[in-house]
Amino acid sequence: SAYDAGEHESYMRKEMLEQPTTAQAVLRGRLDDRFGTAHLGGLDMDARDLRAVRRVKVLGCGSAYYVGQMGAGLIEELARIPADAEAASEFRYRDPVIEPDTLYVAVSQSGETIDTLLAVQEVRRKGGRCVGLVNVVGSAIARECDGGIYLHAGPEVAVASTKALTNMFLGFALLALQLGRVRDLSIADGRRLVAGLERLPAQIEEVLAGEDDLVEVARGLAEARSLFFIGRVRGFPVAREGAQKFKEISYCHAEAYQTSELKHGPLALIDPDVPTVAVVPHDELTERNVAALHEIAARQGPLVVVTHEEVDLGEVGARRIVVPRNEPELDPILLTIPLQLLAYHAAQHLGHDIDKPRNLAKSVTVE
Ligand code: AGP
């Protein structure tokens, strides 16, 4: 066929390794070095429309929802517009208030996920504006939206999404940049982020090149009955996506938690049989994150920490996975890549059908 796994042992592996190239595709022709902004013709919104946005609500399901949470964080940070993400599958059931000055953003690889499609229809029926971050051109969600950003990740076959999710994050970065630059985001900050985005594909490649170092760690995690994925603020959706991917293909129970919430309950579960995968970037929260790792280590909880070179973990005895740094706002996507590799190698160790995990379909098109 036109798109097959070729020499790769699975589509998931092929799609993970394609990311440096597919990441370039979503950025191509959309970055403006001179003015430190993005050009998104498909959005169909002029500067005035963009300035009129008072709030952003992201809608997606599963991994698209988690990346949507990363995206909402980016928009709030860069554009200083209140933004959050919600599971599209819940949205319409609570009879949501649709506001004319809210920008709704539907995010979907397939563009056919029924829950996301129905959420878009709910928004539009009540007079709201909904744009799409969609991979499949001409799909139902793309057609239903007022405009959008195509993700250009190419076909994705594995049920566990990788390259499409990375491009969702990059699509959100472009949107956040444009929303920011028609407001208070400085040209200097805009240029800083454009340069960061231009560096990302090579850094993704660098993380993927470290794959061999992760195989043993992944096998260790695969033996666990249950594990935690933790992170805070920018790192929390990274942890959610990491746990999701792990569950989907390894069938191990993995629970994502805000690092800050551990002491409010789940710390009771930490013991030598429950490993924790912690997301600890070098940022303003590093010290607090490391303090939480000490709490886990004191209870003999095994630790795997996805982090930056500069972070000093002290005496926690963790297995460190180091990723390159970009601009802090863009770091979540680089922190996500090793979690894909961990899930992949755990599933492979357990002998599972990686591309077609049990009970799951690539896109859920019936309610
Ligand atoms: C991805 O790894 C998952 N299999 C799943 O959560 C997926 O992201 C979700 O079903 C949404 O699909 P979509 O992006 O095609 O709308």
Image (tube, rainbow, N blue to C red):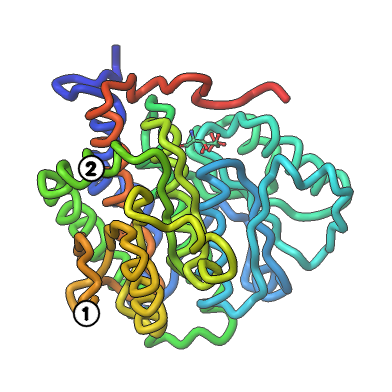
Marks 2/1: CA distance? Answer: 22 Å
- The three-letter amino acid code for the residue at tag 2 is Gly
Q: Mark 2: which secondary structure?
A: helix
Image position of 238 with respect to 292: above or below: above
Viewer-closest of 215 and 299: 299
The reply to whether residue 136 is in sight is yes
Q: Position of residue 275 (x, y in %)?
A: 34, 52
Residue neighbourhood size for the residue with mark 1, other residues' Cα within 10 Å, grouped as few (<14), some (14–19), many (≥20): few
Residue at the image position 29 percent from the left and 11 percent from the top:
1
Q: Count every numbered label the image shows and give the total.
A: 2
Vertical placement of 323 versus 224: above or below? below
Residue position for label 2? 220
Pick the front one: 242 or 227: 227
Label 2 Cα neighbours within 10 Å, binned few <14 / some 14-19 / many ≥20: few
Q: Residue at x 58, y 64 (%)?
A: 265
Position of 97 relative to 346 (above/below): below
